Amino acid sequence: MRPAPERRRELLDTAAEVFAAQGYDATTVRRIADAAGLLAGSLYYHFDSKESMLDEILSGFLDDLWTRYDRVLAAGLRPRETLEALVTASFREIDRHRAAVAIYQKESGRLRDQPRFGYLADAQRRFEHAWLRTLESGVAAGDFRTDLDVRLTYRFVRDTVWVAASWYRPGGRHSPEEIARQYLSMVLEGIALRNGQRARAHQAHAPRTHEPYE
Amino acid sequence: MRPAPERRRELLDTAAEVFAAQGYDATTVRRIADAAGLLAGSLYYHFDSKESMLDEILSGFLDDLWTRYDRVLAAGLRPRETLEALVTASFREIDRHRAAVAIYQKESGRLRDQPRFGYLADAQRRFEHAWLRTLESGVAAGDFRTDLDVRLTYRFVRDTVWVAASWYRPGGRHSPEEIARQYLSMVLEGIALRNGQRARAHQAHAPRTHEPYE
Amino acid sequence: MRPAPERRRELLDTAAEVFAAQGYDATTVRRIADAAGLLAGSLYYHFDSKESMLDEILSGFLDDLWTRYDRVLAAGLRPRETLEALVTASFREIDRHRAAVAIYQKESGRLRDQPRFGYLADAQRRFEHAWLRTLESGVAAGDFRTDLDVRLTYRFVRDTVWVAASWYRPGGRHSPEEIARQYLSMVLEGIALRNGQRARAHQAHAPRTHEPYE
Amino acid sequence: MRPAPERRRELLDTAAEVFAAQGYDATTVRRIADAAGLLAGSLYYHFDSKESMLDEILSGFLDDLWTRYDRVLAAGLRPRETLEALVTASFREIDRHRAAVAIYQKESGRLRDQPRFGYLADAQRRFEHAWLRTLESGVAAGDFRTDLDVRLTYRFVRDTVWVAASWYRPGGRHSPEEIARQYLSMVLEGIALRNGQRARAHQAHAPRTHEPYE
DNA sequence: CATGAATGAGGGTTCATTCAT
DNA sequence: GATGAATGAACCCTCATTCAT
């Protein structure tokens, strides 16, 4: 078994694309091989199994994601800034790992229960913890509204961000940062127009002056 | 013919539950049969195929949904009220058809291309049209912010609502109306705290005095 | 279990028709039931199994056939007259039991080996014996050519007659007797034109003056 | 790609043998696989479906057959010689494609209606046309008797030849040419003994001096 | 590294048959 | 006599996986 990590990456990217488009179960190993330009059996020189491809795709994505999240969480920002930073990091991750995110969205619910994919449940717990802490300390700090159910808010923000992977196409009109900004504006300020909204809204569009993470 | 349609409904509900939990492709017909307490082959007395079960589940849900949406859209409400009504109707639909909504979320992307499921693409177009019109006339009427990309807003609102099906459990702590109210409050006002927020937020919780639709 | 032998016969005729058209294995019990205007399960009030229908159809036909053949064979005719009588009896049987004959042609080869259908092998042996004896004594008596392989001739005559069931339609242009006459003329005299042929051929068409059998 | 086509041919021959013995519908894919010495699923590496095996078997046979028939029909022989040549070609084809012919006999009636096997109906029409023309011009030329119904004669000759596939075993006592000769003798001259028959019959057995076709 | 051919487990589906009503 | 619903065995076919070349 030689190295050739680039070929591996290539094949993995192809697989991720097909998994994302067809769903993991509906994807045959042959379809991946077709897309990659070799025969089904040949994939087994590079990977142990179809499942291990999925595994590698998902864990690769989560590793990247946590690297960034951890940097944000360790930066000691104020709650609202933390939230903004996490959302922005998420959209950047969607940009880099679109297929993996889409797969994660669709399949993680069921995979979580299998021992091999236990790390998905772990990741979810860490997500929940990070977000809840951020929101709760934001409420305590007067950054966020106090009248909302925090769990509901958590789900709202979380889902709101990740589903974007289902329609986002890298290289499209909006950069990930631009999308993050608009999403943050909606999540934080709402979509309803109010007195003085225009001023605040304009702020939301203003170029960020610092980007402490990544 | 006697109580045939009820049995059909029973089996369909069981199937929907399993499809939602495992994904359509990962679900074997035997598993559905197990859950329903009969043998795999017996399902074919009631249905033509696994696919036709899926079809019936999805189209049943969409029919119900459009019945309600159409009532709302025909009511001649102001844009913001229309949006509130649509979101509320959606959460009620999630409450009644949780499994179907979850399936729709996960599978419709891929099914859309098959002739048999062409109605999924149609439905999506009608959704888009209804929502975009509501948002655009809301912007024109001064109900909604003018600085947001309308398509982005559309996706934001749409996804935000429907993903809820992935965690919602009927009969849980919050009624669909209660969840709708909190979501609407977040979507419309945002989660950030501002001057005078408390008053408005309180309003969001106030009991609705009229429910013109459904 | 009450009598109702007419219903039985009706159903059996329907079954025979479908078996003949589709082949026994390709015929589903449900198709027979459809054609007979009842539900598949209801057939089992009348018959033990699909196979027993087939059995009854085939043995019914063979019983009839042997009744006639035996009468012919017992009549003490000269070999050539015996042959003519057997062929004529066969075409009459094709007329009365067209479907059964067609089924017999297609399926008997395979059924013969099953214990339940052992009588098919018996029948074939009796056929062979009757025909070979007729042909051999015909050769000895100077009725038939001496230069032909008798077994080959037997197969030639036998098949030549029975395959007709595959295209024969009762109530068509030609009566069974008419067809028998033409076939006999071809089998006995050949299709080639020869000196004095016209006279003999005409004879073949002449009305039979006696019909000792049937 | 190396010796792939040979394996295909091997498997196809095996399948044809089993189809011929058991009937297409009564034959399970597994049985074919058993006879070929591999597992049922492995057949699908070589063929799309059970039906496509049948298709290939039948169309392969018909292609071969028409190649020979066309050569005969294009040779410009006299009607009687044409008939002799066609019958001889048929028996040679039975020798080479015994199983396929038997399958054709048993199944073509039902298959004809399926779009995929439409070529069976075409073939039948071409057969009919070729034979009828030969017989009719033979009648006109004084080769064949004028007192016979031509359609009946056509069926007589056609069936007479092809059913032989149900009992013929390649490598048996008689060569296909020998069988053809005896059949032709019976069909043309009849089996009845007549004045001067012996001379003509002897001719029928005489070695052919020329074989212009094949 | 890749191919071609095969394996073996299972999946969707069909269908003869049963039986309470 | 017939129906509606179910059984259970088997069938065709798919697909992840293996392995000699």
Image (cartoon, coloured by chain):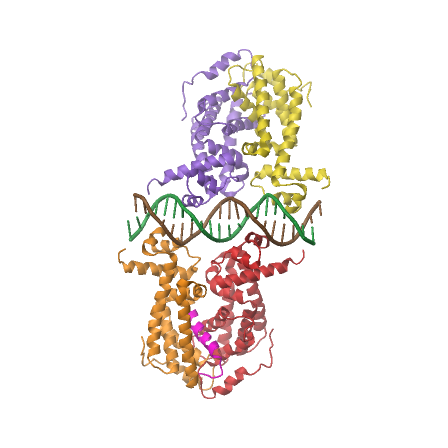
Chain colours: A yellow, B purple, C orange, D red, E brown, F green
The quadrant in which the N terminus of chain C is found is bottom left
Q: Residue at x 45, y 73 (%)?
A: D156
Count how many numbered circles sit on residues in the image: 0
- Left or right: residue C45 versus residue A172 is left
C162 within the magenta span? yes
Vertical placement of residue C181 versus A183, above or below = below
Q: Nearer the viewer, residue D129 or D57?
A: D57
Q: Position of residue B118 (x, y in %)?
A: 50, 40
Query: Is D69 in the magenta?
Result: no
> In this rendering, would C117 be left or right of D86?
left
Say left or right for B31 vs C50: right
Quarter of the figure with the C terminus of chain C: bottom left
Magenta stretch: dominant SS? helix
Residue D56 lies, in percent from the top left, at: 56, 60
Q: Is residue C37 visible?
A: no
- Compared with A144, A166 (above or below) is below
Q: Residue C143's quadrant in the figure?
A: bottom left
> In the rendering, at what x and y percent does residue A155 appear?
54, 24
The residue at the point 31 percent across, 61 percent down is C9
Along the line of sight, which residue is nearer the eye, E15 or B146?
E15
The stretch of residues the image draws in magenta is: C144-164
Q: Is residue C127 above or below residue B84?
A: below
Residue C133: tell me if it is visible: yes
Judging depth in this view, the residue of D125 and D58 nearest the camera is D58
Residue A179 in percent (x, y) is at 62, 26
- Where residue E5 sits, quadrant-wise, is bottom right
